[in-house]
Amino acid sequence: MEVCKIQYTSHIDVRYAETDQMGVVHHSVYAVWFEQARTEFFKTVGSTYADVEKQGFLCPVLELNVRYRYPTHYGDTVDVKTTLMRKGKLHFKFHYCAYVKGTLCAEGYSLHCFLKDGKPTAELPPQVDLFFPPEKS
């Protein structure tokens, strides 16, 4: 698996509406935070997911996994560290670690592929090529 040289950390303030009756962030919210982190990750190279779509590519989520380690609460700032990995020619995995004040609260990943004309493709948008520059010899 090839690991992208770029990592990005999103800073997310927990909103009251994201908590359950026990005052803990609801488990479903982490998927939303991971999507936000993915979107911000693309912006690190001066692009947006909308730019990728304009070039005829889609990037569906094929799999989502979250492991909860420690609860987060209203008022916390959650730092989501995102790393992108290339898995073969067609698949990409975003790995996420969510921290509050340095404590790992959740980690997970989302698996993706690129589609062009509705079919999986090894062709990549130019923005994604920037994530995996060729090794210098």
Image (tube, grey):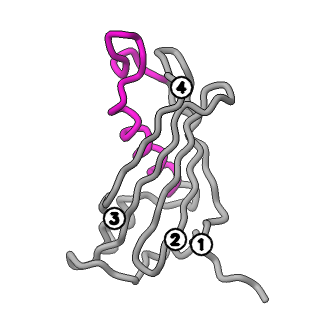
Q: Does the residue at mark 1 contact the one at mark 2 (Cβ under 8 Å)?
A: yes
**Residue found at the very far left of the displayed protein:** 118
Q: Which mark is residue 70?
A: 4
Residue 87 at x, y = what percent?
Answer: 49, 72
Circle nearer the viewer, 1 or 4: 4
Residue receiving disc 3: 59
Q: Gap in Å between the C-alphas at discs 3 and 4?
A: 30 Å
Callout 1: SS: strand
Residue 106 at x, y = what percent?
Answer: 51, 36
Q: Gap in Å between the C-alphas at discs 1 and 2?
A: 5 Å
**Residue found at the very far right of the displayed protein:** 137
Q: What residue do we see at 45% from left, 67% from top?
A: 92
**Residue found at the very far bottom of the displayed protein:** 137
Q: Give the mark, 1 or 2, whose residue is nearer the N terminus.
A: 1
Q: Does the residue at mark 3 contact the one at mark 4 (Cβ under 8 Å)?
A: no
Q: What residue do we see at 79% from left, 89% from top?
A: 137
**Residue 99 lies in the magenta-colored region:** no
Q: What residue do we see at 33% from left, 64% from top?
A: 59
Residue 102 at x, y = what percent?
Answer: 68, 30
- What crowding class fits label 2: few (fewer than 14 Cα within 10 Å), some (14-19), or many (20 or more)? some
| Between 43 and 5, the one nearer to me in the picture | 5
Q: Which mark is residue 2?
A: 1
Residue receiving disc 2: 86
Decide if residue 129 is on the left or right side of residue 19: right
Callout 4: SS: loop
Circle nearer the viewer, 3 or 2: 2
Q: What are the residue bounds of the magenta stretch? A: 14-42
